[in-house]
Image: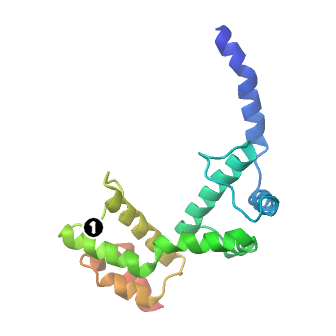
């Protein structure tokens, strides 16, 4: 029981820190300051961070990348990030693995290798799960009207996708746009 009592101050400190959560703008400002103080370099990954500040910013950046790829960062937030010189190149790098044509090619190859099946997010296989997550982001982008008819048409050309897209309600929506 003595060990448990010794952990109470740490728990109180953690609780107090959680109560003082920073806003998105606070983190963006800290990142801007960090970059200007470190020769326009971004914080390294959390595994190599040398300070708590660097680790915190690296974690925040990882969350922003995820939000960007999911389409949940607002245009205003993307614009604010792009104002930081190091982030302009980073955002371009975030886009690279998500190039539409490459993703559709990967999906087509996977479907051809797995006839009659589409990728599942519950899969334990990296490529299948990655493609399923990409398809989920495509669905989200369509719902927020961020996909053009050309991309939707290209996706329909992948075996099995026309049915999947009709389940999403994408074909009906695309024809009304």
On the image, the x and y values in percent for residue 76 come to 72, 74
Q: Position of residue 93 (x, y in %)?
A: 56, 71
Nearer the observer, 125 or 53: 53
The tally of labels here is: 1
Q: Give the residue drawn at x 68%, y 69%.
A: 87
Q: Quadrant of residue 161?
A: bottom left
Local secondary structure at mark 1:
loop
Kindly indicate the quadrant of the structure image that contains residue 115: bottom left
Q: Residue furthest left?
A: 115
Q: Judge whether 55 appears above or below 38 on screen.
A: above
Q: Residues within 10 Å of mark 1 (few under 14, many from 20)?
A: many
Q: Is residue 83 visible?
A: yes
Relative to 75, is 145 on the left or the right? left
What sort of colour scheme is used for the picture?
Answer: rainbow
Q: Residue drawn at (43%, 84%), measured in percent from left and top?
A: 173
Q: Residue at x 78, y 61 (%)?
A: 25
Residue 21 location, x and y as percent?
75, 47
Q: Quadrant of residue 44?
A: bottom right
Percent position of residue 175, x then y: 41, 90
Where is 31 relative to 78, above or below?
A: above
Q: Residue furthest top?
A: 1
Instruction: Tell me, yes or no, if residue 140 can be seen here.
Output: no
Disc 1 target residue: 118
Image quarter where the N terminus lies is top right
Relative placement, left or right, of 128 versus 19 is left
Q: Nearer the viewer, residue 2 or 62?
A: 62
For image coordinates 53% across by 81% down, the residue present is: 145
Pick the front one: 171 or 41: 41
Q: Is residue 122 left or right of residue 85?
A: left
């Amino acid at each position: 029981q003595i060990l448990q009592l010794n952990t109470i101050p740490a728990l109180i400190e953690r609780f107090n820190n959680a109560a003082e959560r920073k806003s998105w703008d606070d983190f963006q400002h800290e990142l801007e300051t960090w970059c200007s103080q470190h020769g326009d370099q971004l914080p390294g990954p959390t595994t190599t961070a040398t300070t708590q500040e660097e680790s915190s910013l690296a974690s925040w950046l990882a969350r922003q990348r995820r939000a960007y790829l999911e389409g949940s960062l607002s245009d205003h937030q993307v614009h604010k990030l792009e104002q930081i010189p190091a982030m302009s190149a980073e955002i371009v790098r975030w886009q690279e693995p998500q190039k539409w044509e490459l993703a559709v090619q990967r999906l087509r190859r996977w479907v051809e290798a797995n006839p009659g099946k589409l990728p599942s997010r519950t899969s334990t296989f990296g490529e299948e799960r990655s493609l399923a997550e990409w398809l989920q982001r495509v669905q989200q982008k369509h719902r927020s009207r961020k996909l053009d008819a050309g991309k939707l048409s290209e996706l329909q050309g992948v075996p099995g996708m026309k049915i999947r897209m009709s389940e999403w309600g994408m074909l009906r929506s695309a024809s009304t746009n």
